[in-house]
Image: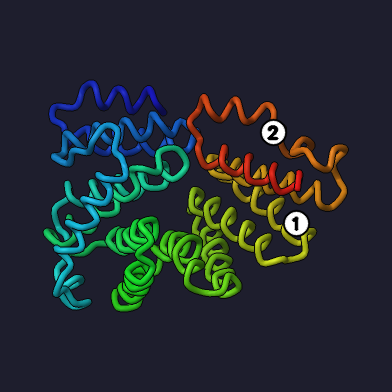
Amino acid sequence: MAEVLNCIITHAKCFDDKLRAYCILIFSLGGQKQLVKAIEMGLDVLERLGEKFPTNPDAKDGMTEVLKTRRMLEGQTLGTLIGKVIKDRRVLTIMEILESLALYSYYGKPEYIPLFACRMIQLSLRHGWCSFTTFGYALYSLALSTYNDLKGAERYGKLALDIMKHTNAWYPHCRVNAVIYGFVFLRCNHLQLCLEPLAKAYRDCVKIGDSEWLVANASLFATLSFQCGKELSSVEIFLNEAEENAKKWKTTTGFHNTRPLYQAILNLMGKANQPTLLEGEAISFTKEISNERGREMVQTTSRLQLYQMRVAY
């Protein structure tokens, strides 16, 4: 496939003719765990489309964009937010790329998430609503929560749900639920209340073949189930089922993040030779910790350290 896409990119007469090929190549890199390459290519394409981002953003960059977006949202109502529809194909493509890069950034470069969230909202305020807008507000609520604005995070999380309801846009909930119930609402609601929306999003991802978000929802549901004290054997069974579904679609980029949890469950169930070490059938802490640093998979690295501490304790 890469050869065909590169052929299109090489021989197409103008950038707009190359755009779809670039998008597919970005999504392909993301699906192959080449997240840094996917993000870099995505940022390059976005810059050529007029949407530039800093090379090494920090918390200050994110806060600046959050404050700018907050000012732009002042006085807006649900009606004004969805009253106009985006028709510009370039803007739609930008929104699509931003949505995918947000997922890849979560695994590898989370410092970009507030920037992508705010840009999606800003574009929607200027050009109108599209299906990606709903995810943008969910992502914006996540960005607010990272800066401990839990009241604002809950407000915009609920707004994302309201937009889905009023626009009858069904498919975005597979992605919106992952962000809202997997990261935002659990900070202001009981964890148990977040389980069913994630389970529903996972089941619907299986039905429609949304492989990347199937993995994301499965990972979040399993993690919350563990945190809620669900029976360990049931979480183990769910993870096995989810991994089989992921393999059908040949997408396991994010599923690797569940390996530390899976091994911790095996340890706690007495299925590991060394109960206090995250070493066994699912993963080897010693090998993975060095490999992940090289691939910049920060989420997997943090999970390795978290669950190693838990089984050691």
Sequence-earlier tag: 1 or 2:
1
312 lies above or below 39: below
Q: Which residue is mark 1?
A: 237
Visible residue check, residue 164: no
Above or below residue 113? Residue 184 is below
Q: Position of residue 145 (x, y in %)?
A: 39, 61
Disc 1 versus disc 2: distance between alpha carbons?
Answer: 22 Å
In this figure, which residue is indicated by the disc labeled 2?
Answer: 285
Quick one: 149 or 226, which is closer to the camera?
Answer: 149
Where residue 171 appears, x then y in whole percent? 40, 64
Q: Residue at x 68, y 53 (%)?
A: 239
Residue 37 picture location, percent across and down: 38, 29
Few, some or many residues within 10 Å of mark 1 (<14, 14–19, 20+)? few
Count of numbered badges drawn on the protein: 2
Q: Amino acid at mark 2?
A: Phe
Q: Secondary structure at mark 1?
A: helix
Q: Nearer the viewer, residue 231 or 274?
A: 274
Quick one: 63 or 138, which is closer to the camera?
63
